[in-house]
Image (cartoon, rainbow, N blue to C red):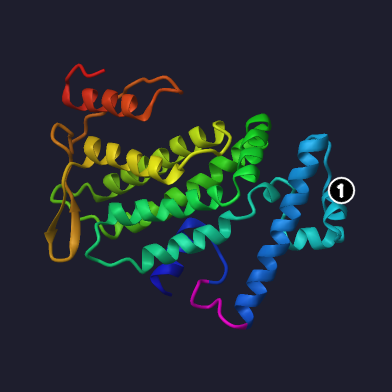
C-alpha cells in the first residue's frame, strides 16, 4: 500500500488515487463527479426553495432527471448531498502530502494541503455561501460538517506524525495540536469569507492566518536530524504537561485571538 493510500485509509477515505485514475477510470471518475454535482445542485435548489426537512430524496432525484435508485448510487442520504466534493478533495490532499518534497517543512506541506480545501469552496462562491447558510440552520448538517472536518484533521495528523522529530518524545501531541491549529485557522478564514458573501481574496487571508499561527506556536521552522524537519516551539511555549486556556469573542479578529494565546503562553499582558 502506498503512502497516499495509507493516508486515505487512516482518514476514512476510499476510492481511486490519482495514479489509478487514468484512461477509462479517469473518464468514469469525471462522469461520477458530474452526476454528484448535478444531484447536489438540485438538492441545494430544493432546500433553498422549500426547506431542508420538507425536501425528499425522490424530489431531488426528479429535479435532477434521474430515478431514486440512481440517487443512492451516489449518496447514501440527502444529508450527504450537501457535501459532494470532500471525498475527491481528500484524495487530492492525500496525494499532495504523499508527493511532498522531504526537504519541505511538514507544517508548510499541511498548509498547502488545507489550501486545496479552501479552493474547493472558493471555486463556487454562491454554492458555498448557500451551503453555509443552510448548515447553520440544520443541526444534522452541522454535525455532518464536524465529521467532515475531522477527516481532514486525521489526515494531517497522520502525515505530521510521520514527519515530526523532537527530542522530548512529544511527536504525537505536536502532530495533533499542529493539525488542529491549521484546520482551525482555515475554518476561521473560511467562515469569515462565507459570512461576507464569498467576496474578497480568501487565499491571502489564509496565508496571513498561517503566519500568525507560525509566530505564536512554532517560532523558527528548523531541521535537526537528516532530512526530517523538526518542530521548534516558539519562545515561551512549553513542551511539558502545562495547559493554557484563553477566551476570545467568536467574531474577534485572528490577530487579536493569536495575541491572547501568545500572552497566555508567555505570561505577558498582550491585548
What's the residue at 17%, 38% (across, down)? 234
Report whether residue 35 is seen: yes
Relative height, residue 12 to residue 153 (above, below): below
Report whether residue 52 is seen: no
Q: Mark 1 sits on what residue?
A: 59
What's the residue at 17%, 20% (across, down)? 268
What's the residue at 48%, 63% (across, down)? 92
Relative height, residue 120 to residue 227 (above, below): above
> x, y percentage for residue 8?
47, 63
Element class at badge 1: helix
Crowdedness near tag 1: few (<14), some (14–19) or many (≥20) residues, C-alpha within 10 Å: some
Give left or right: position of 247 versus 54: left
Seen as rendered, the residue at the extreme bottom is 23
> x, y percentage for residue 208?
33, 40
What's the residue at 56%, 39% (across, down)? 198
Give left or right: position of 208 versus 164: right
- Start-end of magenta stretch: 17-23
**In front of the other: 169 or 48:** 48
> x, y percentage for residue 271?
26, 17
**In which quadrant will I find the N terminus?**
bottom left
Labels in figure, total: 1
> x, y percentage for residue 207?
35, 44
Give left or right: position of 179 versus 12: left
| Magenta run includes residue 151 | no
State the predominant SS element of the stretch in magenta: loop
| Magenta run includes residue 22 | yes
Amino acid at each position: 500500500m502506498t503512502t497516499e493510500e495509507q493516508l486515505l485509509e487512516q482518514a476514512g477515505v476510499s476510492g481511486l488515487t490519482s495514479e489509478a485514475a487514468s484512461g477509462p477510470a479517469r473518464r468514469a471518475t469525471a462522469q461520477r463527479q458530474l452526476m454528484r454535482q448535478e444531484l447536489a445542485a438540485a438538492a441545494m435548489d430544493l432546500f433553498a426553495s422549500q426547506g431542508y426537512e420538507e425536501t425528499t430524496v425522490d424530489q431531488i432525484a426528479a429535479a435532477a432527471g434521474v430515478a431514486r435508485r440512481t440517487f443512492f448510487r451516489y449518496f447514501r442520504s440527502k444529508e450527504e448531498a450537501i457535501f459532494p466534493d470532500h471525498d475527491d478533495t481528500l484524495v487530492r490532499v492525500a496525494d499532495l502530502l504523499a508527493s511532498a518534497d522531504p526537504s519541505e517543512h511538514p507544517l508548510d506541506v499541511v498548509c498547502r494541503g488545507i489550501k486545496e480545501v479552501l479552493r474547493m469552496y472558493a471555486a463556487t462562491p454562491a454554492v458555498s455561501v448557500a451551503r453555509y447558510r443552510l448548515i447553520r440552520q440544520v443541526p444534522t448538517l452541522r454535525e455532518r460538517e464536524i465529521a467532515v472536518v475531522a477527516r481532514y484533521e486525521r489526515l494531517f495528523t497522520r502525515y505530521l506524525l510521520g514527519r515530526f522529530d523532537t527530542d522530548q518524545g512529544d511527536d504525537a501531541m505536536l502532530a495533533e495540536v499542529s493539525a488542529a491549529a491549521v484546520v482551525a485557522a482555515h475554518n476561521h478564514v473560511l467562515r469569515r469569507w462565507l459570512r461576507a458573501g464569498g467576496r474578497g481574496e480568501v487565499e491571502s487571508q489564509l496565508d496571513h492566518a498561517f503566519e500568525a499561527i507560525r509566530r505564536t506556536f512554532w517560532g523558527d521552522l528548523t531541521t535537526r536530524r537528516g532530512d526530517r524537519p523538526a518542530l521548534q516551539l516558539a519562545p515561551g511555549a512549553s513542551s511539558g504537561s502545562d495547559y493554557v486556556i484563553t477566551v476570545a469573542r467568536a467574531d474577534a479578529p485572528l490577530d487579536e485571538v493569536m495575541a491572547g494565546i501568545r500572552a497566555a503562553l508567555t505570561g505577558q499582558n498582550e491585548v
